[in-house]
Amino acid sequence: MPIPTNRHKEHRKPKIGLFGLGLEAYWPQFHTMKARVEKNIAEVEARLRTLPCEVANFGQVDNDSSALEAGLFFCREAVDLIVCYLVSYGTSDLALRVIQRRRAPVLVLSLQPTAALDYENANTEDMLVYCSSCGVPEISNVFARARIDFNLVSGVLDRSHPAGEKAWKQVESWVGAARVAHNLQTSRFGYLGHAYPGMLDMYADFTAHQIQFGSHVEMVEMCDLNHRLKQVGEAEVQDRLNEVRRQFVIAEESPADPLATAPSPEQLTWSTRVACAMEKLMDDLQLDGFTSYYRGFDNEAYESLGASLILGGTLLTGRGIPCAGEGDLKNCFTMYMMELMGAGGAFAEFYAMDANEQFMLIAHDGPGNFAISDSKPTLRGLGVFHGKRGTGVSVEFRVKLGPVTILGMAQNAEGRLKLIVAEGESIEGPVLRIGNTCSRIDFHRPPADFIQDWTRHGPTHHFALGIGHLSGKIEYVAKLMNLELAKV
């Protein structure tokens, strides 16, 4: 499915700090050992550089002065994740000295060069090059006492061995989690208007979001969008309208719902003009995500503007800037997390259960996502946005068939934000044709049982729907960012 021709947003890369932990006392005793372990450090660096990240390699830490220097180096480099590679045995005080200077998440690699020593021919130096497992318990003890959370990947440096392949897949997952965390910590989200009145689960705690994620929430006024609307030229509208006609199916009247009609030329042109203004707003404010709800009144200008954000939100979401409706900031965050994991992330909620065929109908009126649509999305004109004021153009599409994940975010009684995740399958079959996103999702259990299991964790009623089974990746992100995670 093609994404919009306007440039897809480039997400920021995390910076990984790498050092090898060894012991200076070994080098004069075993004359080739230092060169051997430094070669292994270089190999780890080379592997990391194949991943979507930047690497700041300090090199060998083997005494107190180098440990202090490494800590300062990682501070200067502002690394997002520190990788401590155990090249041999190294004392825990050196590891602690490094980590204490830059309080970033820590990944310890205990990767011996190959699957096993050559027992008949190996000497003491060979044993020391392979003895990364020796220092892991000591480091874990000291880090626990220092209240430093760390994660461990143990295995083999040689990726041709199954133990090496497994270990490097874990490393890739940790780097991917660092990418999500880095982008969240440096992100800017726009919040226009307010939450839908009375939806208490969605009311946003901007302070909690900045404390736990580091994200900035930019408060946006409707006049900010209206100002950009006045800057949109006719040629720009026509170019984007041509693009919309290429990317969407322009629907006729729905055979099922008289409220879902063919969008009028006036509706299409107006929604396209608003879409151009929204893009200017995103670029001017350098936003990574956007959520909005504006009620308006009696067909006044701002009501018309607030009711015409769906097309622009769909184009932006396809560009990599997720847009959530009804002022749901928490859901915009989960959509952005899905986007960063390459899973799309669509604005969604439960519509209904099908107790005959055992699936949940998941849908929403609002922005779609080109990345996960199973075909060209459809544009319909809606005479009513149910529960909302105004009329306009809406998007209808279904998620690609196959594995999917839903990711919700809620706030617990202590005020902490938490994640809730479940995996399922997008399955074939008819869906509603009412101008909404709509998919059949099978969670491999009776839908009534699933709803009971899901709601046990206190979710909000919205969530992000993405392609692929992602609970493992999300678990890595939750650990890296110290987030509570409930898996359903």
Image: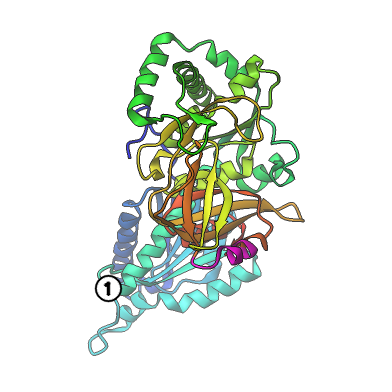
Prevailing secondary structure of the magenta residues: helix
Residue that appears at 27% across and 88% down: 119
- The amino acid type, in three-letter code, at marker 1 is His
Q: Name the side, left or right, on which 5 lies relative to 431.
A: left
Q: Name the side, left or right, on which 351 lies relative to 125.
A: right
Is residue 283 placed above or below 75 in the rendered structure?
above
Q: Which residue is mark 1?
A: 161
Instruction: Pick the residue in front: 248 or 207.
Output: 248
Picture coordinates of residue 239, whole percent (x, y): 36, 17
Q: Name the side, left or right, on which 198 lies relative to 449.
A: right
Quarter location, residue 241: top left
Instruction: Pick the residue in front: 107 or 387.
Output: 387
Quarter location, residue 331: top right
Residue that appears at 46% across and 24% down: 263
Picture coordinates of residue 134, whole percent (x, y): 45, 79
Q: Quadrant of the N terminus?
A: top left
Disc 1 secondary structure class:
loop
Q: Quadrant of the C terminus?
A: bottom right
Residue range highlighted in magenta? 444-453
Is 276 within the magenta?
A: no
Is residue 485 placed above or below 281 in the rendered structure?
below
Instruction: Pick the residue in front: 52 or 412.
Output: 412
Residue that appears at 65% across and 70% down: 145
Instruction: Pick the residue in front: 306 or 277.
Output: 306
Picture coordinates of residue 482, whole percent (x, y): 61, 57
Taking the view exactly as shown, the residue that stands out farthest to the left is: 121
